[in-house]
Amino acid sequence: MNLAHDPAMPRTETSIETPEGVPLSLTIAPLSDRAVALLLDGLLLGLALILLSIAWTFIATQVYIEFPGLGGILIGLFYALIFLITTFYFFAFEARWQGQTPGKRKVGIRVVDRRGGPLTLSALFARNFTRQVEIILPLVALAAPEAVAPGAGPAGRIAAVAWIVLLGILPVFSRARLRIGDWIAGTMVIVAPRHELLDDVIGRAAASADEPARTAPLHTFTKAQLEHYGVYEVQVLEDVLRGPATNRDALRKVSRTIAKKIGAAPPVRGSERKWLEDFYAAQRAGLERDLLFGKRREDKHDTPKS
Amino acid sequence: MIETHEAPRRRRRTTPRMKSLDFRRERERGWRRLDTLLTRIEKRGVRDLTSEEIEELPMLHRAVLSSLSVARAISLDRNIVQYLEHLALRGHNVVYGVKRPPLAWVAEFFARRWPRAVRELRVLLLLVTLLFAAGVATGFAMVTKDSDQYYAFVDFELASGRDPAASTEYLRKTLYESEIGNEGELVAFSGMLFAHNARIGILCFALGIATGVPTALLVFLNGAMMGAFLALFASRDLLMELTGWLSVHGVTEILAILLCGAAGIHLAQAWIFPGRRSRREELTRAGHRAATVVVGGVVMFALAGLIEGVIRQTVTSDTYRYAFATATAIGWLAYFALVGRDPATSEVAR
């Protein structure tokens, strides 16, 4: 249930285990993404506060003209509201949007529990309350050192900058890029990209009824020709075939390289895509069959023992 | 190499017969269904789903997890594995995410979590109370000796004219008459004070990460400020009256400050002395507990603000003020001591 410390994993990958026992691999969000998300949220928050102030001034003036006695209540409410919005902005969104704020959603990152458990509200409180010390206090100190420590003067500003920098680079020293709020809350921020389910490269033309002939393989490959590549190459080829269909040059180049390697005749002009699709299908079928027998060939340098 | 029975080149089908393709054909409908439901939840919230659809979720999620395991074992189609991984993660967030209706969570919070978390911090709470008392004593002693020291402890804006230069008559007036003519001003002031105090309270918690020394200092200085205040009014023979005036909302407010202070020290303690557990684990446990205490603290600050703005303004008799303050003190103590003690659900929920 802990962070996997598999040394073979790239540094930005981690995995959590679901209660069902299936490990899910996650990509730790890079700090640049988090900085951008923070900036976006900061801008949005600032904008919201400005709009609120304008609206409040307008409404309060109207109300005050009608009922002068309510003036104090309106001002008191305004202070309370500003406090609530600034303090609970991040919390409210992360609670409502499963660990995302508008900034995080835009950038495509999200907060999750480090152990794969549920994201609790107390965790969200913990990770966002610390922002008071991580961001707000030093920002106030930067703007007005006197407000934080009387008699601080310019030294207070230097200390504030040092504080921001120190806490800003702290996540670099942890594998999962944890800021202090994450340590305390037991959370981490991961990349939450959208993966669409694409049609399988094999037989994808089968879906379009007007071209049934294309689905039958036109090119065949001998068993010996299929013994040059492994999983890695097949998946690179998958990426190539899923790329933009117009990129003919790339297809030609790739098909020639493969033909040369496996000792087959290069495809005729115009049929490179079909040739590559057939090769992909044949190669993947071969490798998957081996997989069922417990043999996995990682790449072209890998020679699994029989 | 083990010889496979048929070489693929012999086959002439519309699509090659492959396990991974059959697998996809069989399961794809379920994946798409979960994807649709999750997209709706992510866009419009769980409430967008009917109860039948919500009942479908865990089943679909488990099916996706099993598909993921199969896909990893038999399919070399990277897109499928990535898609399923991402779908499983999204499902995980929803199935195991924050899903309790907000009102139920609030009820659970006040009925169990908060008073329990406060009880767990009782030793630190006592320590912080002593620290605060030391602050009060220090402030009182120093201002009694030299009234100019008052300005060292009390913020000029918070004092709003109540300083050693003010006449006794003026000081008495601040205790019994709505502030300076306009009665709305006190309400405005209490809103400001709520924001100010709650921010200080959260700061007390967060500064726990800086070894807790700043937290202790904040608690001490808050005590000293009160001590200075008391000393000023005591020098004009208004101590009893001031205490009544202060304690109406002060009981709630000071208790909230103490709670936040204890939360901050708790964080520091877990960080510096993790004990038998790993530092990471202990810090997280303490963080959750302390944050829970502080959320309740913010609510108390809001209550204190309300009391200050509404009740103190209308109740001007010393006797009633003391009676109210005593009632709130007993109320809070009973609440923290007694609520949420049922053993049936005593497992610590994070």
Image (spheres, coloured by chain):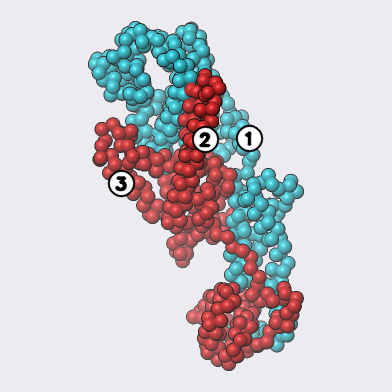
Chain colours: A red, B cyan
Query: Residue B26 bears which disc, if any?
Result: none
Residue B32 percent location from the top left of the image: 69, 61
**Looking at the rendering, in which quadrant would you find the N terminus of chain B?**
bottom right
Quickly name the residue at label 2.
A55
**Could you tell whether A81 is left or right of B162 in the image?**
right
Q: Is residue A254 above or below residue A74?
A: below
Residue B43 percent location from the top left of the image: 63, 50
Give amino acid for label 3: Ala
Q: Crowding near pointer 2: few (<14 within 10 Å), some, many (20+)?
A: few
Q: Residue at x 55, y 91 (%)?
A: A263
Q: Residue at x 28, y 39 (%)?
A: A156
Quickly name the residue at label 3.
A162
Label 3 to label 1: alpha-carbon separation:
42 Å
Nearer the N terminus, badge 3 or badge 2? Answer: 2
Q: Nearer the viewer, residue B281 or B139?
A: B139
Quickly name the residue at label 1.
B103
The answer to whether residue A86 of the structure is visible from this angle is yes
Q: Is residue B268 above or below residue B45?
A: above
Q: Which of labels 3 and 2 is toward the front? A: 2
